[in-house]
Image (cartoon, rainbow, N blue to C red):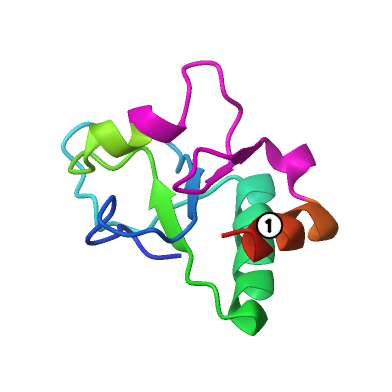
């Protein structure tokens, strides 16, 4: 997984939001990430289904300090369970349980 996403919020690509494990204060954002396995599996499922459909997807770690908080606040609610798959039209899949192969494919086809 990439440590960050450039140009986020200036694209209409679907976004997958997830939370990397907390880093100690002062640690660099580019240090090796450790991601919860359910979120990694959900993000990988999205990427695996997006490629054959020709859909570009951006992966976003909401714990990155230099991330534009506005884009996270727009698509991820305070009580949402991550990961979240979001489209520019506001539609979302929330929580790893929503990330089934069929639901992800249908979601991406509508992107």
* Nearer the observer, 79 or 108: 108
On screen, residue 68 above or below 73: below
Residue 100's x, y, as percent? 81, 52
Magenta span includes 82:
yes
Q: Nearer the viewer, residue 86 or 20?
A: 86
Where does the C terminus fall, quadrant-wise?
Answer: bottom right
Look at 64% across and 61% down and name the residue there. 108
The answer to whether 79 is drawn above or below residue 15 in the figure is above
Residue 24 higher or lower than 36, as above or below: above
Can residue 102 be seen here? The reply is: yes
Q: Position of residue 89 (x, y in %)?
A: 49, 44
Q: Which residue is mark 1?
A: 41
Q: Name which residue lies at 61% across and 72% down.
A: 50
| Callout count | 1
Image coordinates for residue 46, horizontal then vertical, percent: 64, 62
Left/right placement of residue 71 relative to residue 76 reads left
Kindly indicate the quadrant of the structure image that contains residue 54: bottom right
Disc 1: CA contacts within 10 A as few (<14), some (14-19) or many (>=20): some
What range of the chain is rendered magenta?
A: 73-99
Q: Is residue 23 visible to us here?
A: no
Residue, x 67% and y 65% (percent of image)? 109
Query: Which of 35/54 is in front?
Result: 54
Q: Is residue 83 above or below residue 35?
A: above
Q: Helix, strand, or loop for circle 1?
A: helix
Q: Quick check: 97 left or right of 71?
A: right
Q: Position of residue 95 (x, y in %)?
A: 67, 35
Residue at image x 65%, y 50%?
37
Residue 67 lies left or right of residue 107; in this view the side is left
């Amino acid at each position: 997984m990439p440590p960050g996403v450039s140009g986020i919020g200036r694209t209409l690509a679907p976004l997958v939001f997830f939370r990397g494990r907390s880093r100690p204060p002062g640690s660099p954002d580019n240090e090796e990430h450790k991601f919860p396995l359910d979120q990694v599996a959900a993000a990988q499922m999205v990427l695996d289904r997006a490629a054959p459909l020709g859909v570009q997807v951006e992966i976003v770690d909401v714990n990155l300090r230099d991330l534009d908080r506005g884009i996270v606040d727009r698509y991820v609610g305070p009580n949402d369970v991550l990961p979240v798959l979001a489209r520019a039209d506001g539609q979302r899949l929330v929580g790893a349980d929503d990330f089934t192969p069929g639901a992800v494919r249908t979601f991406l086809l509508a992107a």
